[in-house]
Amino acid sequence: IPQYLISLCTPKHRILRKESKGREIAHNDTFTFNPNYSSKLKRVRIPLVKDTTVNRGGDGGAGVATAGGAGASSAEAVATDGAIPAPVEEDRRHLVEAAVVRIMKARKSLHHNDLIAEVTKQISIRFVPSPQFIKKRIESLIEREYLERAEDDRRVYKYMA
């Protein structure tokens, strides 16, 4: 539960207000609803804050726990289990996002399947991303307002300059 409370208190969303500062939650911390919170999005996705306070014991610091909530895909589950190192996973995320923005900047509007195919084609030289991985990166770009969905067809993405 502390992970979820901290996620609701992040500066980007701040749906709840925490009396004390910092990421840690003490037993006497109180949370209040933020009546000033508003969002222009119909649906707000709140990413789960990673919990790095678990398993910092005798295994040499290698057992840092990660958050697996908020729609983690099987590709992400493999990545956090150690098959793909975290820095490589982060680099791949940036590569996919950069490719999506590059493509959308040139095309302005594109159907979901066409965008997935184009990103896969451009990045397949370095690695072959799964469609689920690309979709998660597209969702991330939508949340950060680089892209938006077309109002008439939800499968079409538009580039926001």
Image (cartoon, rainbow, N blue to C red):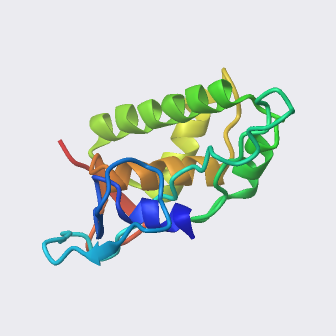
**Tally of marks:** 0
Residue 115 left/right relative to 147: right
| Front in this rendered view, residue 8 or 85 | 8
Query: Residue at coordinates 39% horizontally, 66% vertically from top-left?
Result: 29
Q: Residue at x 50, y 47 (%)?
A: 137
Point out residue 118 in the picture as x, y percentages from the top left corner.
Answer: 52, 39
Give me the residue at 61% from left, 38% from top: 120
Is residue 67 something that shows in the picture? yes
Q: Quadrant of the N terminus?
A: bottom right
* Residue 64 found in image quarter: top right
The picture quadrant where one finds residue 55 is: top right
**Is residue 98 depicted above or below 23 in this figure?**
above
- Nearer to me, 64 or 37: 64
**Could you say where residue 37 lies in the image, as x and y percent from the top left?**
19, 71
Residue at 66 percent of width and 25 percent of height? 88
Quarter containing the C terminus: top left
At which x and y percent is residue 136?
54, 53
Q: Residue furthest front?
A: 28
| Left or right, residue 31 beside residue 87 | left
Relative to residue 46, is residue 127 drawn left or right?
right
**Where residue 52 sits in the image (x, y, percent)?**
62, 44
